[in-house]
Image (cartoon, coloured by chain):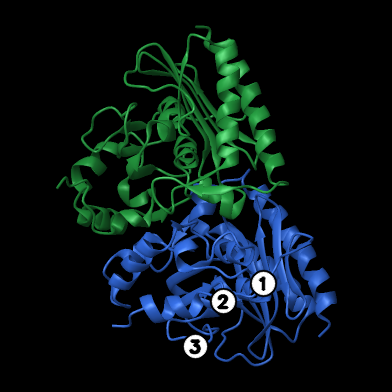
Chain colours: A blue, B green
Amino acid sequence: MDLHEMDRYIKSIIKEAGHKIRNSFLTDISIESKSDANDLVTNIDKEIEQFFISRINRDYPDHRIFGEEGFGDEIKDTNGVIWMLDPIDGTMNFIHQKRNFAISLGIYADGVGKLGYIYDVVNDDLYSGIQGGGAYYNDERLRPLQDTEIGESILAMNATWAVPNRHFDHNGTLKLIQDVRGIRSYGSAAIELAYLASGRIDAYISMRLSPWDIAGGMVIAKEAGAVATNFKGEPANLLEQDTFLAANPSIHAKILDRYILPK
Amino acid sequence: MDLHEMDRYIKSIIKEAGHKIRNSFLTDISIESKSDANDLVTNIDKEIEQFFISRINRDYPDHRIFGEEGFGDEIKDTNGVIWMLDPIDGTMNFIHQKRNFAISLGIYADGVGKLGYIYDVVNDDLYSGIQGGGAYYNDERLRPLQDTEIGESILAMNATWAVPNRHFDHNGTLKLIQDVRGIRSYGSAAIELAYLASGRIDAYISMRLSPWDIAGGMVIAKEAGAVATNFKGEPANLLEQDTFLAANPSIHAKILDRYILPK
């Protein structure tokens, strides 16, 4: 697998997909709910996933595809090459804001992240990462993350997780909220991971993310030096929904140890 | 007071200030704390406030200036014309992210908002409002806000306010977080009000804002149809820090009545 050749290919289809999404703003978008009333999907999410699948099937027929909208393969193991795709990460933002969403794509070989892409479509900002080759913001190489302290950190976290819940003791979250310098929430895991990789936030935490939400961003964030795990400190889950913490390496373990209190 | 003439004048000095801020990214920025360790100010906040003051004093010598950094006048009443200025709203974002901050400026005559400006410096996006003359995103007139429901709303709120606090019963906040469609937090009241005015969010709530945080955004948001008050339903405070709720007119009273539970 020639990563640099694939990188050029992927960038070109991502830009093509972004063009399709921008054009969709001129059309009527149809909106449906999935697992619950606020889990939204549009015809554009579906069309963009199908566009990627048709290209991948044509040009990389041996590869498998794990996509949010379910048009790809049924994935039960991480063997071989898998494209993990969220055609529009942040669908609610796409619908309500027409911004702050991204195409998220990660290419994994036998469970190891090789290539990662987050394309902020409206700003035409592409974040990318190549295993061992660095993380990039457009053509600019991102600097390795600098050490920080929890008290000087900006944490991305949805306020939903401050509500008492069945996943873990929310008192840890409340303490973390009080201890960090600031909290932000952008409504797209991909954009939050792009912000982590570029040092604009220092940690991103979520109680429930799917592989396609994090696959692309993890490659990029790791190339910038970030650490990503579930709440048990295990490698982030590439097959199922799980808890997720990605952070500057100087505070990742501290957040897990001091604030993530399993029930 | 010729609002259209002032509008042209103000837009030109705001763009000039934005140019100075963008140039500051090439220099070393010095950072200090104010009221607490996370209440940050830089030499750029101060220089930009002084730039505005020098222009206003020269060209509108009868007007008073209420600025975040304190170089303006001491303001104890709303008589006459007052320029309410936050030279960099979202200083933490300015420092950590070099984006997601704004110049915020409101011009009030005897306590009535006449002109409002929010300039997202890095994106070169100017939101503006003229009393009775509409709200604008760059040159495009913003559409009046459409009716919505709480369950279909996006609320901007800092997760800090989900923590038990002395201002009000946080159980109301927790309920509101659960009832809305989504929560966002961008770290700049000005940007959050610009998002409200442009319909990208439906409500913005904060337990503690100063007049210069909201003065510009309120003129713009009101011209788009939004309603802004403190938690008692009184007009937003133009003289002192206070609670703040600005929202789509179809849900403002519902949020106050159902979720804001005074202690």
Q: Give how far across and how far down residue A129 sits, in percent.
A: 71, 72
Instruction: Choose the circle earlier in sequence order: 3 or 1.
Output: 1
Toward the left, the furthest residue is B263
**Looking at the picture, which amino acid does disc 3 mark?**
Glu
| Mark 3 surroundings within 10 Å by alpha-carbon count, few (fewer than 14), some (14 through 19), many (20 or more) | few
Chain of the residue that carries numbered disc 1 in the rendered image: A
Furthest-top residue in this view: B1
Q: Is residue B52 above or below residue A134?
A: above
| Sequence-first disc among 1 and 2 | 1
Q: Taking A57 as reference, is B123 above or below it?
A: above
Q: Nearer the viewer, residue B183 or A146?
A: A146
Number of the label disc, if any, that sits on residue A246: none
Among the 4 quarters of the image, the one containing residue B119: top right
Q: Tell us which disc is closer to us: 2 or 3.
A: 2
In this view, the residue in front, A37 or B169, is B169
Answer yes or no: do the residues labelled 2 and 3 have beta carbons within 8 Å?
no
The kind of secondary structure element at disc 3 is: loop
| Numbered tag placed on residue A234 in the rendering | 3
Looking at the image, is A145 positioned above or below residue B8?
below
Q: Is B178 on the left-hand or right-hand side of A137? A: left
